[in-house]
Image: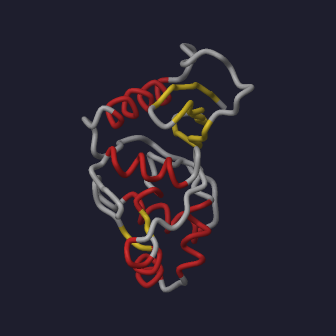
Amino acid sequence: MSLCYVDSPVGRLALEADHDAVTSVRWAGDGERARARDTSSTPVLKEAVKQLDRYFARKLKRFDLPLAARGTDFQKSVWKMMCEIPFGGTATYGGMAMALGSGPRAVGMACGRNPIPIIVPCHRVLGSGGKEGGFSGGKGLPTKRQLLAIEGVVLL
């Protein structure tokens, strides 16, 4: 496993990769390394940092990275569907559930277990009627609103 850190507008992120694929993006804890970036990271992590920098600068609308998220087949189907939501767009738990022949709660649980947030854009999934729903990363819903605002989506 390789690891690097990056400071972002939504907090310090820890990026992890196995071999040539990103496996995790998480918010780093207070006690983790003080350096913003680990220069010994692998080529895939260097590319992930580069793409995240471009995303936060509003210059990248779609990530193009090899991903290797660990989860159930159902979770992977939800995560794949999230990757199809375009930059600046949103979907609902209910709409995704209907497309997958499942229930909104199951989709919400899969969103909450997404190991690669931001790159796999779980922040683009909303509750019915455009309600925020939930968000397990960063500072929760304020972080979700911040990510959506980067993409030009303003929740009422």
Q: Does residue 90 appear to the left or right of 142 in the view shown?
A: left
- Is 129 in front, or is 106? 129
Quarter that holds the N terminus: top right
Query: Number of labelled discs?
Result: 0
Q: Residue at x 30, y 48 (%)?
A: 151
- Is 17 in front, or is 120? 120
Q: Which residue is drawn at 54% across and 13% down?
A: 39
Quarter that holds the C terminus: bottom left
Q: From this view, report whether residue 115 is shown above or below residue 127.
A: above
Q: From this view, report whether residue 139 is shown above or below residue 53.
A: below
Q: Which residue is drawn at 48% across and 80% down?
A: 97
- Is 91 in front, or is 147? 147
Task: Residue 11: give x, y in percent of width and height.
Answer: 53, 33
Q: Which residue is drawn at 68% across and 20% down?
A: 33
Q: Does residue 34 appear to the left or right of 88 in the view shown?
A: right
Task: Residue 87: give x, y in percent of width and height.
Answer: 29, 52
Q: Does residue 102 appear to the left or right of 113 in the view shown?
A: left
Give the colour scheme shown: secondary structure
Task: Residue 35: give x, y in percent of width and height.
Answer: 60, 15
Q: Does residue 124 appear to the left or right of 72 in the view shown?
A: left
Q: From this view, report whether residue 33 is shown above or below residue 126.
A: above
- Residue extending furthest toward the right: 31
- Is 110 in front, or is 19? 110
Task: Residue 28: give x, y in percent of width and height.
Answer: 64, 33
